[in-house]
Amino acid sequence: MDVRNVDGVIILTPKGLLIGGKETDDLESRIKDLDSAGNEKLLINLGKTTFMSSMGLAALFLAHAKYVRRGARVKLCAVDRKIQQLFVLVKLTLIYGDDLHDSEEDALASFRRIPSKAEATAG
């Protein structure tokens, strides 16, 4: 899994199959660690994810729940068409709503429009 920081947004890019196993466990662990550290902006780029089972879906649902509970944001981008159909089927598109983006660039641009907690309280 690739992990990058672009303008304060942590980008996780899992690769291959998210079906429960090393890649899914790694994704869940990174999300948990970032959440515990107070990360405010997380982007999960699914452009290199080729298949997802209920285990991968659960990891994405829990990421959203943990971040929203703290007032932080998690977004998804570059979702494969077949995986996007799965999102529609299980209503994950309703949960993520406007936080689903076609490209990483679109998602990063949308984060720039959101003030951080520190900026919001200072203004």
Image (spheres, rainbow, N blue to C red):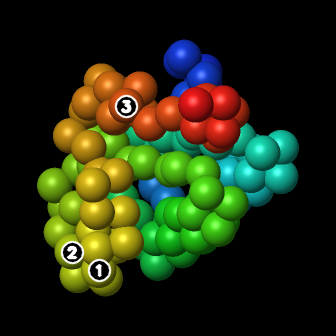
Q: Indicate the secondary structure of the residue bearing disc 1.
A: loop
Instruction: Say which quarter of the image contains residue 81.
Output: bottom left
Badge 3 local density, few (<14 within 10 Å), some, or many (20+)? few
Q: CA distance from mark 3 to mark 2?
A: 26 Å
- Which residue matches tag 3? 113
Observer-nearest residue: 72 or 2?
72
- Which residue matches tag 1? 91
Position of 92 relative to 68 (above/below): below
Q: Which mark is residue 2?
A: none
Dot 3 and dot 2 residues touching (CB under 8 Å): no
Q: Indicate the secondary structure of the residue bearing disc 3.
A: loop
- Which residue matches tag 2? 88
Dot 1 and dot 2 residues touching (CB under 8 Å): yes
Give the mark toward the camera: 3 or 2: 3
Q: CA distance from mark 3 to mark 1?
A: 26 Å
The quarter in which the N terminus is drawn is: top right
Residue 83 place in picture, x, y as percent = 27, 61
